[in-house]
Amino acid sequence: MNGAEPLLDLASCRHRQDRLRRHMADRSLDAVVVVAPEHVQYLTGHRWDARFSPLAAVLASGDVLLVCPDRPVDQAAADEVRTYAAKWRSTLRNDQREASAAIFGDWLAARGTARRVGVEFSSCPPHVTRWLGDAAVEDIEPELLRQRRRKDPDELAVLQRAIDATGAMVARAREVVAPGVSELTVFSELQAAAVASCGEMLTGTGNDYASGVRGGPPRSRECVAGDLFILDLGPAYRGYFADTSRVIAVDRRPTDEQQAAWAHACEALAIVERIARPGVRCRDIYEEVRHWLATANVGSWSSHLGHGIGLAVHEAPHLNPSWDDVLEEGEVIAVEPALYDPALRSGLRIENDYLVTAAGLVNLSPFPLGLAD
């Protein structure tokens, strides 16, 4: 994306800025500066790809700055938009972060001294912090990640477009997957289906496109009759990631063992749909599914059960015993029970995306689950 048009609703971006300011007041922060593309987008509505070094700053007093490459955007959730030269005679500069940070430094200096500033410790470079002088610096990233868990309506709309694209990809896969077809051909056909569904370039291609194995990128290998083809699809639309998985029997003739394992995994999804709601511990959901999958006649499972999705393909909450998250209303989660075994050629993983509501889960990916249709 080049940032020319807002990717999110600008009024919603302003609400997100207000939420951030409430946290800033609690922590006595005078300013927050973000450089990660997803946080620039989250707060201002605009996103640039990895070739560029945009920046956004939010003052507790109310002003918001957006620093963007080359040309100003016409509409942004910002009070001032400044630019830096990202290219000289069409050649990308390697010192863009220094250039954008200098713009920020001039802007901040004109507004007085900031005593406490929030930055993203994982991505904010010295190019930025050098302009903060003696200010105390605090990691704002954990709070931004916490706030990102609950999706606003504009985020849900973008996420749904990405999820709908996976439906188009699965429909195309059912047309093209067959013995003798290359995995790379399947991958190419599915990417074309996603682009047609979204109506623009994707910002991510997502996950697993390998047949007869648990997962992996597409290979030059041809699909083989009897194999199960796990398609774990994670296209990103305007920076927001879907994550759904379907399994196709390459020859459309699943064995009795494959069909039984598929039914067992589908029942695991049904268990999650029955028990998941705000306030439920993700570890408890994981344990319920673990006990159920352990009763399968064939196949085993030892991976996570799922995770949140949004501006990253893996976000909180984590349906994983390594974390102790609790579901919250407004989250979007991907739930992916699986069973793997060589006898299944080589296994299956069924994944749906759900919105967590006060009444429970709403399935955002109600696409057919079958192995053959």
Image (spheres, rainbow, N blue to C red):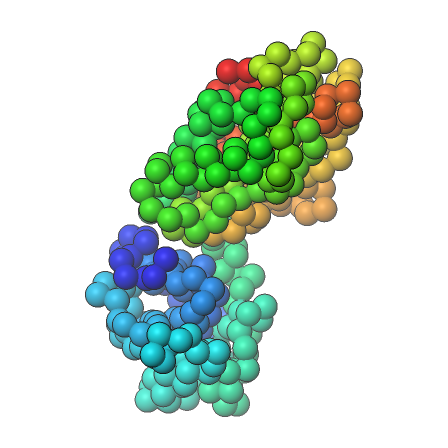
Q: Is residue 296 left or right of residue 86?
A: right
Q: Quadrant of residue 317?
A: top right
Residue 333 locus on image (x, y percent):
53, 39
Residue 244 locus on image (x, y percent):
52, 34
Q: Is residue 309 left or right of residue 237?
A: right
Residue toward you, 275 or 353: 353
Q: Is residue 110 left or right of residue 287?
A: left
Residue farthest top in this picture = 256
Residue 322 locus on image (x, y percent):
72, 46
Could you tell me which residue is drawn at 40 percent across and 35 percent down?
193
Could you tell me which residue is drawn at 58 percent across and 32 percent down?
182
Q: Is residue 297 visible?
A: yes
Q: Is residue 362 left or right of residue 44?
A: right
Residue 209 to residue 63: above or below: above
Residue toward you, 294 or 25: 294
Could you tell me which residue is drawn at 62 percent across and 38 percent down?
220
Residue toward you, 55 or 193: 193
Q: Is residue 356 visible?
A: no
For the N terminus, the quadrant is bottom left
Residue 355 to residue 40: above or below: above
Residue 204 locus on image (x, y percent):
48, 49
